[in-house]
């Protein structure tokens, strides 16, 4: 049983640029959720994807967008990067309504 | 906003001793799930223990147990026989199930240090 894999592990971008983060879900899981974890804080829910559709969204602006593919892997896209977007981005896969989440090791994004 | 509060930013414990991490939460739901996650320097969130709110019995996983007080909305984690490998950031989380959307709301975390 494979776990959740995120890429890249680290990334440095310039303010105003766009970034794409990737997540491969655990085998058998059909739902992917993305979280933003600022330094010294707990993770904050960005959005969730189920069967390739957005299935709930947190308090993040539209420049945060995502995709889920038929194999249940997912991408998080952030446009017009701001300094405050610097954070650890965590992906978690699950089976919808099964109350169990497997997290990846995250992508550390630094915006300069 | 429904919140999860961890009032202890840092805790320390001697190896082989017992430590309790506190967590309180609010919710308007009657049935929900609560979690404790461990985040070591490797950054991956690792599930420590899970509690279903409709179950009165406190969950236990080896050296880890919880004290779940539903009326008080309290969910503390007890680590017995602490080991050096237990040192990490610990997050309490509540699962919201708004319709078909399941998401986790996390506290700010407690940094646990284990002293040899």
Image: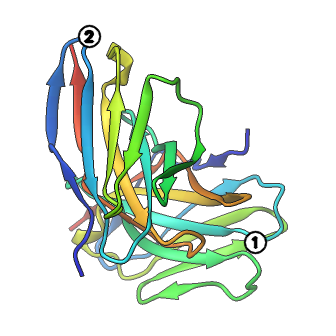
Q: Which mark is residue B69?
A: 1
Q: Is residue B41 left or right of residue A84?
A: left
The answer to which of B60 and B22 lies nearer the viewer is B60
Locate the C terminus of chain B by quadrant.
bottom left
The answer to whether residue B48 is above or below residue B39 is below
Q: Is A70 on the left or on the right of A13, as rendered?
A: right
The location of residue B105, given as percent across then percent down, is: 58, 50
| Residue at the top extreme of this rendering | A16
Please name the residue that numbered disc 2 is placed on: A15
Seen at 34% across and 14% down, the residue is A80
Residue A53 vs residue A17, the one in the foreground: A53
The reply to whether residue B12 is in sight is: no
Q: Residue at 71% of width from left, 63% of height from top?
A: B74
Q: Indicate whether B17 appears above or below B1.
A: below
On what subunit does the disc labeled 1 rest?
A: B
The chain carrying label 2 is A
Instruction: Please name which of the two marks, 1 or 2, marks the residue nearer to the observer.
Output: 2
- The x, y position of residue A56, in whole percent, is 60, 47
């Amino acid at each position: 049983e494979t776990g959740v894999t995120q890429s890249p592990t680290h990334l440095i971008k310039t303010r105003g640029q766009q970034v794409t983060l990737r997540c491969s879900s655990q085998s058998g899981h059909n739902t992917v959720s993305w979280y933003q974890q600022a330094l010294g804080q707990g993770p904050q829910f960005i959005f969730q994807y189920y069967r390739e559709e957005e299935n709930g969204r947190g308090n993040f602006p539209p420049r945060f967008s995502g995709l889920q593919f038929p194999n249940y892997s997912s991408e998080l896209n952030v446009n017009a990067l701001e300094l405050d977007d610097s954070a650890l981005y965590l992906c978690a896969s699950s089976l919808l309504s099964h109350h169990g989440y497997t997290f990846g090791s995250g992508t550390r994004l630094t915006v300069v | 906003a429904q919140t999860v509060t961890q009032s202890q930013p840092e805790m320390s414990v001697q190896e082989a001793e017992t430590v309790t991490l506190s967590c309180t939460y609010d919710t308007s739901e009657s049935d929900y799930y609560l979690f404790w996650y461990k985040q070591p320097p490797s950054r991956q969130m690792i599930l420590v223990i899970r509690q279903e709110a409709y179950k009165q019995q406190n969950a236990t996983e080896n050296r880890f147990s919880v004290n779940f007080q539903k009326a008080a909305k309290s969910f503390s984690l007890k680590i017995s026989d602490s080991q050096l490998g237990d040192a990490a950031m610990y997050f309490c989380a509540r699962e919201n199930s708004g319709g078909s959307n399941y998401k986790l709301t996390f506290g700010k975390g407690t940094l646990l240090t284990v002293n040899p």
